[in-house]
Amino acid sequence: MSNNAAHIIQQFGGVKSLALAINKDPATIYRWTYPKHKGGTGGLVPRSALKKIHAAAQLLNITLDVDKQSPDSLTHTPHPHQFVNWFRNTAPYIHAHRGKTFVINFSGEAVDDDTFSTLIEDLALLNSLGIRLILVHGIRPQLEKKIAAKKRTSHVFQHLRVTDKETLEMAKEATGTVRTNIEAMLSTSLANTPMADSSIRVASGNFITAKPLGVINGVDYQFTGETRRVDCNAISSTLDSGHIVLVSPIGYSPTGDVFNLRSEEIATAIATDINADKLILMTECNELLSQDKQLIRQLTTDQAQVLLDKKNHQYNDTSLHLQEAIRASKLGVERIHLIDRKINGGLQLELFTREGAGTLISTQPFEDARPATIDDIHGILDLIRPLEAHGLLTYRPAETIEMDIEKFHVIEQDGLITTCAALYAYPEDAIGELACVAVHPNYRTGERGDYLLTLIEKEARSKGLTRLFVLTTQSSHWFAEKGFKPAVIADLPKAKRDNYNQTRRSSVLIKKLA
């Protein structure tokens, strides 16, 4: 079988279809389509994935052997209809993000990478869409090169560099060089590039007032500091004038001293003080993976803390980014995104697609879990019809859904109903039926069903119900894990017993509500 990525993706009907067929992130599939100098695989599918692709192709009756394309065809223009559909799907995100303030942190490693020009183009696109950008850059590798060139020794404790006077001078030099290079790249407006006619204005300045870290655990960090105050008024007025704000990891004290700061700490301080809509940390790897090595797409602050506490190394980059995300969330930033900056287009995938490409951390797990309204009927039907076709749910006409809409709760993400469930109360028996539980196939790894079940149980208690029952044909184990116990038809309320479908022979399970 050919390992030509373009041909395989085309035969499966697109990146998302292939990703779903072999249970991989769309971002991974996209990476196969980019040349190696841009972080891709040169247009070839890795051998480790070919076996899964072959099995999926056989299952779906897809022919992959005939390959008339070459890797060069990866740069082909997508079919017009594909482009139109993609562009339409991004519209809700464009509307939602316009006028919002994003703080984006990226490392000095990102600046030195050959793909940094692509990230700059992505940032320019965000700016053109009306997003207010505050960029915070790092200088670690640039500073280390200067230290090595002068054959100096630099001490690092718990991921914090001890900055003496000579190291501080080198940090200032590195900062000036990196900042100038970023400003130059953002000023690019060459024809036939994504930045043509962009006319971006960049503003840097003394936005950060710093203070020394002092002595920690017996270590004097000298000119290493931390953020004391953010000049929010100056940053806001600069953003209001249409500029991108560029902040370097250098801070100034009222006495005129200069301090070397961590860029991640600055980004968190700015995001919290200015009430940014998003804090985005561009990381050096896919940091948060589940036990089966899949990207964790969403965590609550509490879940992130549990994950951090389990990590053996509290001072590696992964843990430090997670710490900053947790701190920012606790300080009021609603959404923090961790994105592998090596994913070509990862920023756009995370911000403009439902699947995303990174990990979202927020205080609440699903902000859009709510009672259903009449406007949700179409979304509920789209969610339950495939399950009804496979016999997992009892068929419900649209008219029934409309009549019972006040009994439903849904979870919505970016306009898509991902989860639904209904509560039918039998107050005379102090029992309720949990019905029509459905989770979209692409969202079954995020505990959405658990969260909605919790909401249904809370509502049942508020109605004075002491028990909850469910009828299921294929999900008995899942409900058993949630505390439901096997029961018999005689345990159901009379109205439900009289309408029990003998043909489906659904299992009866009941849970006592504490």
Image: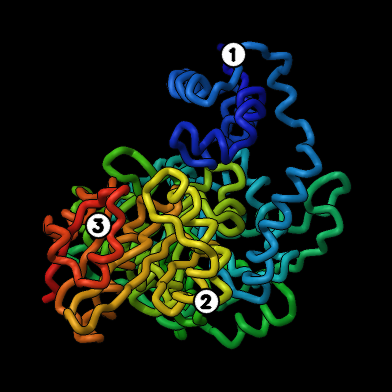
Quadrant placement of the C terminus: bottom left
Looking at the image, the residue that sits furthest to the front is 498
Q: In percent of the image, x 26 and y 66: which residue is there?
A: 498
**Location of residue 226 in the rendering, given as x and y in whole percent from the top left corner:** 38, 72
Closer to the camera in the image, 390 or 290 = 390
* Disc 1 element: loop
**In the rendering, at what x and y percent does residue 362 appear?**
39, 69
Look at the picture and state if 130 lies above or below 292: below
Residue name at image x 66 percent, y 46 percent = 118
Q: Which mark, residue 445?
A: none
Find residue 276 and name its label.
2
**Among the 4 quarters of the image, the one containing residue 376:** bottom right
The residue nearer to you, when weighing 169 against 390, is 390
Report the Cα–Cα distance between label 2 and label 1: 47 Å
Which residue carries the number 1 mark?
2
Q: Amino acid at mark 1?
A: Ser
Q: Residue at x 63, y 50 (%)?
A: 119
Residue type at mark 2: give it: Ala
Q: Earlier in the sequence, mark 3 or mark 1?
A: 1
| Disc 3 versus disc 1: nearer the observer | 1
Residue for point 39% across, 46% down: 391
Is disc 3 surrounded by few (<14), some (14 to 19) or many (20+) residues within 10 Å? some
Q: Residues within 10 Å of mark 2 (few under 14, many from 20)?
A: many
Q: Are marks 2 and 1 in contact (CB under 8 Å)?
A: no
Q: Closest to the observer: 403 or 19?
A: 403
Q: Give the image quarter of residue 399.
A: bottom right
Q: Which mark is residue 308?
A: 3
Q: Is residue 386 left or right of residue 234?
A: left
Taking 293 as reference, is 66 above or below it?
above
